[in-house]
Amino acid sequence: MQSLIITLREGIEAALVVGIILTYLGRTKKDYLKRNVYLGVGVSVVLSILTAVVFQLINFNPENEVLEGTMYLIAGIFVLSLIIWMNKTSKNIGKEINERLDAITDKSKGQALGIFLFTVFMVFREGVETVIFIYTLAGGSSTASSIIGAVFGIIIAVAFAYIFMKGSSGIDISKLFKVINIILYLLVIRLFAGTIHEFGEVQLIPLRPAMASIIGFIVRDNSLLIISIILVTIPLLMMVFSKEKKELGELTGVDKRRRLAELNRQKNFKIAAIALIITIDVLLGYEFVGAVTKKVIDPVPLKVQAVGEEIKVPVGSLGDNILNKFSYETEDKMNIRFMLIKRGDGTIGSGFDSCLVCGSKKGGYYQEQGNSENVICKNCNAPIPIPTIGFPGGCNPVELKYQVSGDEVIIKTSDLLELKKDF
């Protein structure tokens, strides 16, 4: 689903630019150059795929916080550069592109090449962003699901492009880009928040619990869904509510019938736009509702007693890859929480119910129902792979020493008391 959302959003951005180019060529009676636009789009897609292959060859690891944070940063810079460009040209964006195209097509030689290169540059930028977003935001998905999602995203984006370009003659492009700018600002905030989140996990930048809580809220998948819904819906709504000038007063005969036919086509495109809005918003809305209503496993810590200086937990009481929490009450009535997880291979993951970055006050972990691969930090929303529990680094639980004797996990009370001050 994430790859679908990403390709859909970037495809729409590319469609807006390509639409302006094609409109210009049609208006200036240079339709013979449109094939170079389509060729440029095709080449851009191929270059984007090659970029993805390069990412694969360098073994980009979505669980590598440094690489992931860097990709968020690069993506944020890409979008920020787009915002800066749009801010400078939003009043006359169509005019500026037209002027640049005029300079290209006025040349007697090389105008086809100029149109081709211009399209490649404009569309490939969106393609690169798509690759970066997929690797940063959809790293946890399987390859097959990512490909399927991307294909459906492209199909819907193409439908958007066709409907929007055919039915948007009445839209003020300047106002459209101003609206999109606001949405892109939200996206930039999310991307830079992702950078801070990932770099904070590996302590490249200081990240206190209060800041981690704010950042964690911003980087949740729900925020991406909301941005995508707005980005898709607003341009189509602007098209639906745009007013076409009928201009029938001086028309007669064939010209009048042609104009009426054109107005009828515009009406049909608006109906199609409404249908597309409903389709996309239902799709994304379903994903959003699923994300916010997803059931979680956050067990009430089971109180345990020490026998001598040791706490013993039967291995058989731990389900495979299931989060188990325990609470040990000290002599001064302080409850120290800790967690145990029996991995699928039979090994035990042990840690305090306290994040290395976020601490224990708002920290602690939960598990999404049906997700046997990760536990998630309550404060900063960081997913922690179960195989890494018990090892230092990132937002992993604070390490808790233990040993296994026979069929019991044994934890010394002295090791628990070392973190007493955090609880």
Image (cartoon, rainbow, N blue to C red):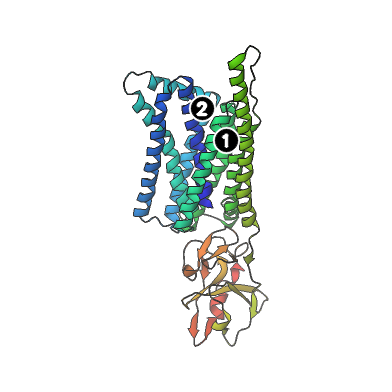
Residue matched to label 1 = 180
Looking at the rendered structure, the kind of residue marked 2 is Lys
**Nearer the N terminus, badge 1 or badge 2?**
2
x%, y% of residue 396?
51, 65
Which marked residue is nearer to the observer: mark 1 or mark 2?
Answer: 1
For the image, the number of numbered tags is 2
Residue placed farthest to the front in the image?
A: 253
For the residues labelled 1 and 2, the Cα–Cα distance comes to: 14 Å
**Is residue 314 visible from the viewing direction of this image?**
no
Quadrant housing the C terminus: bottom right
Q: Quadrant of residue 273?
A: top right
Q: Viewed as shown, does residue 354 lie left or right of 404?
A: right
Answer yes or no: is residue 241 visible. yes
Q: Count neighbours of disc 2 (C-alpha within 10 A) and say few if under 14, some if 14 to 19, many if 20 or more.
A: few
- For label 1, the SS is helix
Residue 176 at x, y = what percent? Answer: 58, 31
From this viewpoint, which residue is outermost toward the right?
333
Question: Is 30 left, or right, of 263 in this rendering?
Answer: left
Label 1: how many residues lie within 10 Å, few (<14), some (14-19) or many (20+)? some
Judging from the image, what secondary structure is the residue with disc 2 in? helix
Which mark identifies residue 88?
Answer: 2
* 411 lies above or below 84: below
Q: Amino acid at mark 1?
A: Ile
What x and y, as percent, mark residue 8?
52, 44
The structure residue drawn at horizontal position 63% and vertical position 83%, both measured from the top left corner, is 305
Q: Quadrant of residue 44?
A: top left
Q: Is residue 270 left or right of residue 156?
A: right
- Residue at horizontal 38 percent and vertical 22 percent from the top: 104
Please report the residue visible at 62 percent of the width from the left and 25 percent of the height from the top.
263
